[in-house]
Image: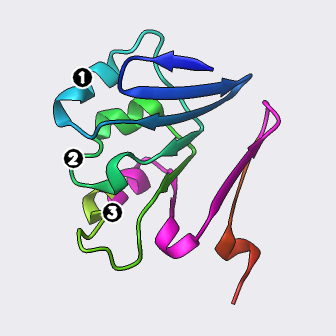
Amino acid sequence: MKLAAVWIFAAFASGIGIAMRWPALPWGHRYEIDLDPPLKADFLKVPHHGSKTSSTDAFVAAVAPKVAVVSVGDGNQFGHPVDSVVARYAAAGVRFLRTDRDGEVTALTDGQTLTVRTFAEDHPQ
């Protein structure tokens, strides 16, 4: 396991990277981008349920995930994830998964490949 800065938890298994970031504070972004070595992750747990201050274009570009998952409840009172955050990941070509629509998300790796499945994919209606 590799820890990168106070705000980032990153686990690297050979070529596969997994990242989770906290807290969702706008002033912390400069630290995320300036990491040495830079943080790249194949799988990202979207910070702070996809709130408007949860990420920036620079953060998404720096991490460059292939898959991002946001943990949110159906019809949550905060409206998370906000549309601008969903659009940010879409513009970066990231597969964006939501627990309110996709259900449980499972990420499996052998250290070389990453397989991501959702409850909705495994149990079509």
Residue 108 magenta-highlighted = yes
Residue 92 magenta-highlighted = yes
Which residue is located at x 51 percent, y 54 percent?
Answer: 69
Labels 2 and 3 touching (C-beta < 8 A): no
The residue under label 2 is which amino acid type? Answer: Thr
Relative side of 81 to 39, left or right: left
The residue lying toward the viewer, choosing from 45 and 42, is 45
The residue under label 3 is which amino acid type? Answer: Pro
The picture places residue 74, in percent across and down from the top left corner, at 41, 77
Task: Give the answer, above or below, for where 35 lies relative to 65.
Answer: above
Question: Is disc 3 placed on a helix, strand or loop?
Answer: loop
Separation of disc 1 and disc 3 at Cα? 22 Å
* Quadrant hosting residue 36: top left
The picture places residue 101, in percent across and down from the top left corner, at 51, 75
The residue lying toward the viewer, choosing from 66 and 100, is 100
* Quadrant hosting residue 113: top right
Which residue is located at x 33 percent, y 55 percent?
Answer: 50
Q: Residue furthest right?
A: 110
The residue lying toward the viewer, choosing from 64 and 53, is 53
Q: Which residue is mark 2?
A: 53
* Quadrant hosting residue 43: top right
The residue lying toward the viewer, choosing from 10 and 15, is 10
State which region is magenta. 86-113
Q: Earlier in the sequence, mark 1 or mark 2?
A: 1
The residue under label 1 is which amino acid type? Answer: Arg
Q: Which residue is mark 3?
A: 81
Q: Which residue is mark 1?
A: 30
Separation of disc 2 and disc 3 at Cα? 11 Å
Question: Is disc 2 placed on a helix, strand or loop?
Answer: loop
